[in-house]
Structure formats: structure tokens, C-alpha cells
Image: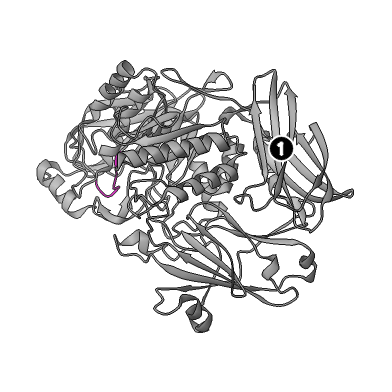
Amino acid sequence: MKIRTIISIFCILLLSMPAAAREVTSFCSGWEFMKGPFTADAMAAARKFNSAWQPVTIPHTWNADDMQKKASSFYAGEAYYRKHFTPDTAMAAKRVFLRFEGVGSCAQVYVNGYLVGSHKGAYSAFVCEIGKQLKYGQENEIIVKADNSARPDVIPVNHVLFGVYGGIYRPVWLVVTDPCSIAVDDCASSGVYITQSDVSQKSAAIGVKVKVGNDTKAPAPMRLEVSVYDMEGRIVCSDSRSFTLSPQGVRSVASSFRLSKPHLWQGREDPYLYKVVSRLYKDGRQTDEVVQPLGVRKYEIKAGDGFYLNGRRYPMHGVTRHQDWWGLGSALTNKEHDFDLDRIMEIGATTVRFAHYQQSDYIYSRCDTLGLVIWAEIPFVNRVSGQEWDNAHSQMRELIRQSFNHPSIYVWGIHNEVYHPHGYTAALTQSLHDLCKTEDPDRYTVSVNGYGSVDHPVNGNTDIQGMNRYYGWYERKLQDMEPWIEKIEREYPWCPLILSEYGADANIAHQTELLGDALDWTSPFYPETFQTKTHEEHWPVIARHKQIVASYLWNMFDFAVPTSRRGSVEARNMKGLMTIDRKIKKDSYYWYKANWSKEPVVYITQRRNNIRERRTTTVTVYSNVGTPCLTLNGRNLGTPKRGNTDVHYIFENVRLDDGENRLQATAGTTGKQYSDIISWSYNGDCNRAADFVEHKAAHGSW
């Protein structure tokens, strides 16, 4: 194992260790579940019918099956979770909180029948203080009402772009603190806010603001000590402040440091993390401690030139990620998050857009240690109702405060493809931008438009303009991507532009070698080969235009869209480079791995298109280890033509034999060779091309 990996793991362990005088324990086991709909009073029904409760373990969603298998046939409504526990009598002198990482999508929390908190929004964490409602040394009942019905006052206001899975689908934690502590309930944040400015290899100015609260009835003499540690555990700098903490409200205590010759956080190349430890003392006794990461870095976006990290131009090779898995929905463990990140790292991506909502804090933390530069956003998508203003602001504030200290985050996403009415949408976007700049003036903001026009009425209200473009799929032809970029370069050279989505769907059961420059996405036939062609055409165009400061292919993984049927599959968006069950890597996955990754790649495309329509055909090989040698049934096929990038090799006019055809590609150095082998079948003139494609479209697979 590499030393950097060991250090990263050690850092994660440090950040997850329980702090002195603060107890954080998992509250995920021992739950029971009851799904509605309820015809009578829901709370009364939940408390009365004990036989209806089913044992579950958190994370849990009731939509893991129905949101993924049949379009527009899923349960969205009320359900209840119940847990009994007996708190130790020692807790009576403490503050006791429940921290929910995610409940879809609206929640009410009851302790022994008393409402202790509520929350609107499926994707951000929230905290309920429950200590005053607990009976210590006795059994207590916790009931959580969850409801994922679409509501006009809660974003997203519908289930159209993606399904909002119902349930307590992320972990729950029991947090116990001293009465004088670092704030737990400041939008469920860490209570610690780290800022940085004037970052260079010579020095960096670091500010740390800690919010502290006093739950007693009298002022308390306190001392706050803030220390910065390097990855070897040495104190780099420290500050101590004494003050009197009144019992009214929350107080902010600020410290500032100047790091000399800081070790910079340099993306995947060197994701170096310091840690900031905030310790609170009362009468010489430590009452609380919070540990947060510090990655010292400077992000800059220069229109027409690109993205800069610490003064160096940085390649923004981006993917997007929806969180749901086949059979699990959104109820994921860290194992699934790690798997997704491993695939993202393997492909060679340097940046991730976590769309279209706040994702697990664990995954943001892992991006800190992996060096992935990330875009985090709220689920203000697709439609407006005119009633979501307050909730959009609330979710934006929660995202920023909860994720404030992740050095990997460079931009806050405000909206995605939200339009009519233009005036309301523009005003709400501008107001959210202002909120971002008030909460966090040092990061960028971005909104996303699907029309591709810089002067669209809802644009121009954030620092960066994102554009979703699907040439050849939803509009025009594949070749129209470059003229669109060139037009923006000519007319809007000042515009910092991100290509926030591009791609095409691919049903791996649909295959053909008969392709044009556009595909009708409303048809039932979604050939994988067209997705491959789309990415082969578009990535080279993106790569040679600096006007695009970052790009994000849509999507890393197939995901559920429970309101539609596309490409002969129910409830699925198939633009992923991998299938929703994460078992199959499509050809386009290897296209990007060959172009982006430093790992050796030799890959022959169209392995699933193995019943061939033409005797004389073309073979494509991706190789980032030199020009490949290709053989067909042992015969050398000569020198290939170079394709759209320097890893793209095309063997033209390859004549197949009747029956089985074994293709082998080999490339590499003298000392190390890499190869790939696939088999195709050709059955002669019995396969008339037009009939063949019609049969594939009708039947989907072979």
C-alpha cells in the first residue's frame, strides 16, 4: 500500500475518532418500520398497531424496489420508524441530540409522544435536541415520521428528473455533549468554520471561527484552544482564547494563523490534509473537541483559459454521480460510496459533479483525501412552483454550513435547468447566490441552463454559467458541439463556461454498427454503440477548447427515473458509463480511462455487439500504451488509422470470416505487453442489415 494511501486512511480515522467529552454513537440498529398510507390519524395508527411494525436497520428506504422497476408505480407518502432505547442516568446532566444525515424527504421526530423537531429536504442533515423529553434510566420511544410526497414548498418539487427515495436512508447518530459545548445544532454543521486566503507556496492566512453554546442558567468562564496539526501529528500553530460564555444564544470565537511554507492540497497529485482541532475548556477541564480537515489550496477560474489550482492550470476531467444503486435505492453504506469513488478514480477523473442534490458527508470527506475537486449542489431542479423560496434558501444554507470545511469543494450549485417563470427563477437564483456569498464569500457559485444560450433570461446570476448540451441525442447532430463552443468563444469570451452535462443513453442489450450522426431518443432503441460514438466525438472537441473551464459527462452510473420508460427499460436513465448495478463497464468507460488515466489500457470496443451485421467492418481499439497490433483469427491486420485522440486506433476494412472471429489487440513496451481479446460472429448473407436492426429494436437483446 502506498504511503500516501496509508496517511489518508489514518487521517480519516483521526477525523472519525470520538472527541473528548463528546460521545457520538451509532443509532442505526433496533428500528422498526411501518409504511402507509394511513387513513386515520397517522400517529395514532403507528402507536396502536404493533403487529404492523417490521424490523429494519438504518440506512433504509421503502422505495428500493418500486422506484427502480416500473415507471410511475411507486409509493410516495407517509411512513413511520420507531425505536426504543434506555439512556443512562449520567446523560441527565448532558445535552443529548439526534443527528439524522438524511431523511426522504420531510421528517417529524417525536420522543415519548412529544414533537422535538421537523425538517424539510431529503438530502441535508438535521439535528433534534431530545434531552429534555427523555426519561433517564427508563425505556423511551423515538418515532420518526417520513414523507416523500412531492410538495410545492420543498425542493425538488417533483420526482421527474430523479426519484426522491423515502425513508431514513442515511445514518443516524446519538450525540451527547457537555452543557457548554461547540454548537451541534448550527444547521447540523460541525460548529467550526475554516477560511483561507492569500494562499501561496510561501504562506497562507488561515481563519477559524468556532460557535459555542452554554445550556446552563449562568455565565461560564471558558477557554478555547485551536491547533493546526500536520499529517505527521505535529502542531504547526496554535491559539488560545479565554472568555465568559453567557447562556443566551450562540457565541462565535475567532482565531487566525499564518502558515509559513504550507504543504498545499494539490488535487489527485498530492491531496495533503492538515487537521484543525478545536478544544473547549471550563475550569481547566476539557468539555468538548471537534476535529476538521484543512486542505490549503487556491481555486481560480479564468474565462477562456481554464481552471487553476494553486496557480497551476489544472485539468478538469469530470463525471457526474447519482447516488442510487440497484436493489438498494439511496440507502447506501460506506462500502457503496467507496466502490463508486474507486471507479471514478480508476477512470482518471479529476473532478466530480455530485448531482442533483447534497450527497453523503462521508463521500465529500473521501474526496478530500483522494484529491477530487468537487461541485456540490442543492436539488433546485426541473420546475418551480412559486412556493419553494424559503426551502431553497434553507437547503442552501444547510449545504454550505455542513460542508464548509471540505477543501475538495470549489463551487456551490444553485439550480439545474429551471426556467419558467423567468423573472421568479432569476430572482430566486440571484437571492441564493447572495446567500452563498454571505455564508461563504470565498467559493464560486454556478447555475445550469439546458438551452445553450448565454443570454437566456435566467442566466447571469451566478459566478459561473453551466450548460447542458446533448448534441446528437436531444438536439441536432454530434458535429454541432464544436460550432456551439466557437460561437460562445467569439461572442462571450468573458463568460466562464462549464459544460455541465453531455452524453447519450446506452442500453447494453441494444447493439448495432449501423449508426448516423443523431439518434431519436424517443425511440425504444438505445444502442450502446451510439453512446460510444458520442463520447468519441465530443471529448476531443472539449479537450481542445479552453473556453470550457471544466466538463462533466452525464453520468458515471445509470440511475432510476421513476416517472418514465426509456430505451425499452422501465424507470431508468441509461447515460451511465456503468450499469446501475455497477456490474458492467460500458465501452465509453474505457474510452475515458484510456484518455484520462495513467493506468495501462488496451481495449477493443463493441464486445457486446458480437453478432455482426457486415462482413467488412471496422475495429476500434483504445490504447494508451502505444500503437496496438490487431489480429483476426491469427492474421495481422496491419497498421491502424489514428482516431480522434492519441489513444484512439481504427482498423478499417476488416473482413470477417464466416462463423466465429477471434480478435486480439496487443500493445505496450518490450518489457510489458497488454492485450485484449473478444469474439464476434458473422453468419453471412442471412443477416440483411435493415432487418437485423429492426429485429434488435423490437427484441432488445440476444
The mark total stands at 1
Residue 488: give x, y in percent of width and height: 31, 21
Q: Is residue 385 one of those drawn in magenta? A: no
* Depth order, front residue of 221/441: 221
- Horizontal side of 79 relative to 85 (left or right) equals left
Q: Is residue 508 one of those drawn in magenta? A: yes
The answer to whether residue 7 is above or below residue 286 is above
Characterize the magenta stretch by its predominant secondary structure.
loop
Q: Which residue is mark 1?
A: 275
The answer to whether residue 296 is above or below residue 78 is above
The structure residue drawn at horizontal position 89% and vertical position 50%, both measured from the top left corner, is 283
For the question of whether residue 2 can be seen, the reply is: no
Residue 267: give x, y in percent of width and height: 57, 29
- Horizontal side of 512 relative to 92 (left or right) equals left
* Depth order, front residue of 700/46: 46
In terms of image quadrants, where is residue 3? top right
The structure residue drawn at horizontal position 78% and vertical position 36%, both measured from the top left corner, is 227
The residue type indicated by label 1 comes to Lys
Q: Give the secondary structure at mark 1.
A: strand
The answer to whether residue 355 is above or below residue 487 is below
- Horizontal side of 242 relative to 645 (left or right) equals right
- Point out the residue furthest to the right here: 284
Q: Which residues are magenta?
A: 504-510
Name the image quarter holding the N terminus.
top right
The structure residue drawn at horizontal position 43% and vertical position 20%, both measured from the top left corner, is 303
